[in-house]
Image: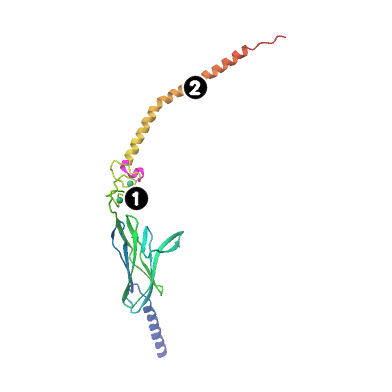
């Protein structure tokens, strides 16, 4: 009986120790810190903080997918991975974080468009296979006004109203009633396009009505000309037959 009890105690200790080795979600915390507002042309500094709350060091691989319009500043080049026919840019780091301490990673990228960007979660995986991730982040790149609406910088009426007025071709339908039919909108999306389409339709109807009498005259004249031509052909045929000399036997 004593032997059995000893075995159960040993098994329980072994089982609980195997669980304590495994990192629980609260043992490793991954955070990403970025500025939420940057100006066009600015370099964005991204800080990843990995916190190890375990009583022992942990080896961890951190990975950051960076999709979108960016220039890599530090490091200069991302790594590339094929994914569903595309090359996806990413950065990764392998770090050992001592017990109850933090590790900070910094990288720098330059956003190439004036718009709202979103970054997916930073992912981390320990050598035991436990995975962790940060919250996703977003930030906005503000335009630096220069009186030129430059769509190659992503400027449009939404993200750069200082340079881009409503109703212009800026790859954004702005839906506004400003007397200009936005070429980026489907006709029903912009009230000005609807008005323009209605005016165009009315003009087409007027044009049709103007052409209608001309068409009815043509409908009358063409058959008359055809009949005259047929009669002329018959007369010509008969006259030409009469004019032929007859041979007497
Ligand atoms: Ca501009
Ligand atoms: Ca537009």
Please state the horizontal and vertical placement of residue 240, each as a whole percent of the image. Answer: 61, 14
Extreme residue in the bottom direction? 2
Please state the horizontal and vertical placement of residue 6, each as a whole percent of the image.
40, 88
Mark in the foreground, 2 or 1: 1
Residue placed farthest to the right in the image? 249
> In the picture shown, does residue 182 fall above or below 241?
below
Alpha-carbon span between mark 2 and mark 1: 59 Å
What residue do we see at 42% from left, 61% from top? 88
| Residue at the spot of label 2 | 223
Which span is picked out in magenta? 184-192
Q: Which residue is mark 1?
A: 151
Position above or below: 242 against 124: above
Residue drawn at x 43%, y 24% as measured from the top left: 216
Q: Nearer the viewer, residue 192 or 71?
A: 71
Q: Is residue 1 visible?
A: no
Q: Is residue 106 above or below residue 202?
A: below
Q: Quadrant of residue 62?
A: bottom left
Residue 114's x, y, as percent? Answer: 32, 54
> Are circles 2 and 1 on residues that touch, CB within 8 Å?
no
């Amino acid at each position: 009986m004593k032997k059995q009890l000893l075995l159960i105690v040993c098994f329980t200790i072994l089982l609980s120790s195997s669980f304590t080795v495994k990192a629980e979600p609260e043992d490793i915390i991954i955070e990403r810190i970025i500025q939420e507002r940057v100006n066009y042309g600015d370099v964005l500094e991204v800080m990843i903080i990995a916190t190890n709350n375990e009583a022992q060091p942990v080896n961890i691989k951190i990975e950051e997918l960076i999709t979108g319009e960016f220039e890599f500043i530090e490091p200069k080049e991302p790594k590339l991975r094929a994914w569903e026919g595309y090359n996806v840019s990413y950065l990764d780091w392998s770090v050992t974080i001592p017990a109850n301490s933090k590790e900070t990673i910094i990288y720098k990228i330059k956003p190439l468009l004036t718009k709202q960007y979103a970054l997916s979660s930073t992912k981390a995986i320990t050598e035991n296979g436990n995975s962790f991730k940060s919250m996703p982040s977003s930030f906005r790149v503000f335009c630096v006004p220069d009186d030129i609406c430059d769509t190659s910088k992503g400027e449009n009426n939404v993200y750069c109203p200082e340079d881009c007025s409503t109703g212009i071709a800026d790859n954004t339908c702005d839906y506004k009633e400003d007397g200009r039919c936005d070429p980026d909108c489907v006709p029903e999306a912009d009230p000005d396009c609807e008005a323009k389409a209605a005016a165009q339709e009315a003009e087409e109807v007027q044009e049709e009505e103007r052409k209608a009498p001309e068409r009815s005259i043509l409908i009358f004249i063409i058959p008359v000309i055809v009949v005259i031509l047929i009669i002329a052909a018959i007369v010509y045929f008969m006259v030409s037959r009469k004019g032929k000399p007859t041979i007497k036997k």
